[in-house]
Amino acid sequence: MEKICYNGKYIDKSKFFLSPDNRGFKYGDAFFETIRCFSGDPLFFEEHYFRMASSFVIMKMDVPFNFDMDVFRKLIQDLLIQNQLDQKSARVRITFFRKDGGYYLPTKNSINFMIDAALLDGSRYNLNINGLKLGVYKDNYIESNSLSQLKSTNRLLNILAAIYARENNYDDVVLMNNFRNIVETVSGNLFAVLGDSIFTPPIQDGCVDGVMRKVLCANKEFNIQEKSLSYLDLLNAEEIFITNVICGVKWVGQINNSHYGQNKTIDILNFFNSHLLV
């Protein structure tokens, strides 16, 4: 029987039900963290942990009493064991939601949390064989504020953009902010190779504070710079790639009539795999 971890207790997934007054369900008053695990170990966990800690502050939620890095690592590891995923690659999601009570104004700031896990194929990050074909989504725009960097459960813009991509035969679409700067894609943070440098939009432009983005920007070898990007910058780039913790890095092959290489993307892929195997 598949298990989940709810507030530190392991229960059958089929026996877990949300309250009709759950604030995450009613108002999107929740955030989540998606973590890739390999052989029972959550990868890049320190970066994930500090992003969760930052999200509590932004969301004005009380930090749970057992929110300790080692404690939560152990909760994840034990869940993987219970679901027989400790010797495989797995996708773990931790969802934090404010406790029931109130309408827009909550009656309390304490939280509940749930951890669930699912099997992933493969033990390493692999490069997509065919370059992704990207479009540009212009029906709605990301607001440039602190809420945009959160992995909140209110992802309506991403949902509508993903539907737009499917309807127009794109693999993914580029999202823009209210100043018409390039921000990210539906599936992750975006990077553009221009000359000897790699550029990625700054957090202030509205992108999610991605863990893989943070890991890459901290590595001086790749000469990654934060810079507001225009649509013209993308068309003039030599390479474009997308990062997220589940896929690692994805090579973009085409935006409109512009086509892109993959040399730097392969370097990034090898870098991520070297971290995965330590």
Image: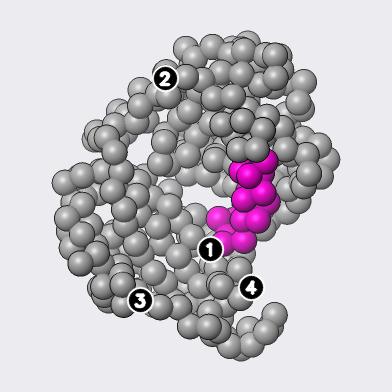
> Callout 1 environment at 10 Å: few (<14), some (14 to 19), or many (20+)?
many
Q: Reply above or below: 117 against 23.
A: above
| Residue wearing tag 1 | 31
Q: Does the magenta stretch include residue 162?
A: yes
Amino acid identity at mark 4: Tyr
Amino acid identity at mark 2: Ile
Give the distance between the C-alpha atoms of the residues marked 2 and 1, in whole angstroms: 33 Å
Residue found at x 30% / y 43%: 120
Amino acid identity at mark 1: Phe
Span of residues in magenta: 148-164
Give the distance between the C-alpha atoms of the residues marked 4 and 3, in whole angstroms: 20 Å
As helix, strand or loop, the secondary structure at mark 3 comes to loop
Of the numbered discs 3 and 2, the one sitting upstream in the chain is 3
Of the numbered discs 3 and 1, the one sitting upstream in the chain is 3
Q: Reply above or below: 45 against 245.
A: below
Give me the disc on residue 27: 4
As helix, strand or loop, the secondary structure at mark 1 comes to strand
Q: Which of marks 3 and 1 is in front?
A: 3
Q: In this view, does 61 lie to the left or right of 228?
A: left
Q: Answer yes or no: do the residues labelled 4 and 3 have beta carbons within 8 Å?
A: no
| Residue wearing tag 2 | 129
Of the numbered discs 2 and 1, the one sitting upstream in the chain is 1
Q: Reply above or below: 137 against 112.
A: above
Residue found at x 59% / y 28%: 191
In depth, the one of 2 and 113 nearer the eye is 2
Name which quarter of the figure residue 70 lies in: bottom left
Amino acid identity at mark 3: Phe
Give me the disc on residue 16: 3
- What's the magenta bit mostly, secondary-structure-wise? helix
